[in-house]
Image (cartoon, rainbow, N blue to C red):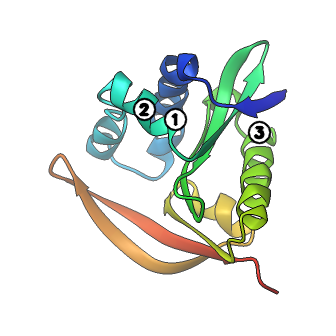
Amino acid sequence: MILREYRPADADALAEVYRDAVLVLGPHAYTEDQIRVWAMHPEDTEEFRHSLSAGVTLCALVDDEPVAFGQLNPVNHLAYLYCASNHARRGFASRILRKLEAHARAEGVATLELEASCVARPFFEHHGYRVVEDERVIRHGVEFLRFKMRKDFSG
């Protein structure tokens, strides 16, 4: 595996990584309607390409193909962390998370925050994050449960 910074040419592949993760891993915790709506993102590839260019976005590649990605945006918020289903549970997301955490610390961040799905919550808890609030959000008329989580780096 190679870990490198995002390039705008990666956007289409990362959209596929995102959708694959949602469609294959999401049904363990979400309904068909929730999966359908969740997988709609990114709806606009150019907007997704632009959003991935903000902040710090890292990609994991296998055989020159992106298989996982994560993003800090802003530097104290984990905006994305997704892995293709056929590469899940192989350490790709953990490695990206560690690199992004190191970057945040180097920038002086004392607390890193994120919103985790029901699927991702155990992963983040394993990495030292704690739930600070349950949150219900509505996307395209469908309600989702997710968790605001936080990890303090001081102490």
Image point (54%, 35%), residue name: 21
Image point (39%, 50%), residue name: 30
Give the distance between the C-alpha atoms of the residues marked 2 and 1, in whole angstroms: 5 Å
Residue 33: where, in percent of width, then height?
26, 42
Dot 3 or dot 2, earlier in sequence: 2
Residue identifier under label 1 = 53
Residue identifier under label 3 = 92
Q: Would residue 89 appear left or right of 57 to someone viewing this image?
A: right
The residue at the far front in this view is: 107
Q: Nearer the viewer, residue 22 or 58?
A: 58
Residue type at mark 3 is Phe
Residue type at mark 1 is Ser
Q: Are marks 3 and 2 in contact (CB under 8 Å)?
A: no
Image point (72%, 53%), residue name: 100
Is 75 located above or below residue 136 in the figure? above
The residue at the far bottom in this view is: 155
Dot 1 or dot 3, earlier in sequence: 1
Q: Report crowding for label 1: few under 14, some 14 to 19, many 20 or more residues within 10 A (C-alpha).
A: some
Q: Are marks 2 and 1 in contact (CB under 8 Å)?
A: yes
Residue 150: where, in percent of width, then height?
60, 74
Image point (63%, 30%), residue name: 6
Is 31 located above or below residue 124 in the figure? above
Give the distance between the C-alpha atoms of the residues marked 3 and 2, in whole angstroms: 23 Å
Image quarter (top left, top right, bottom left or bottom right) of the C terminus: bottom right
Residue identifier under label 2 = 50
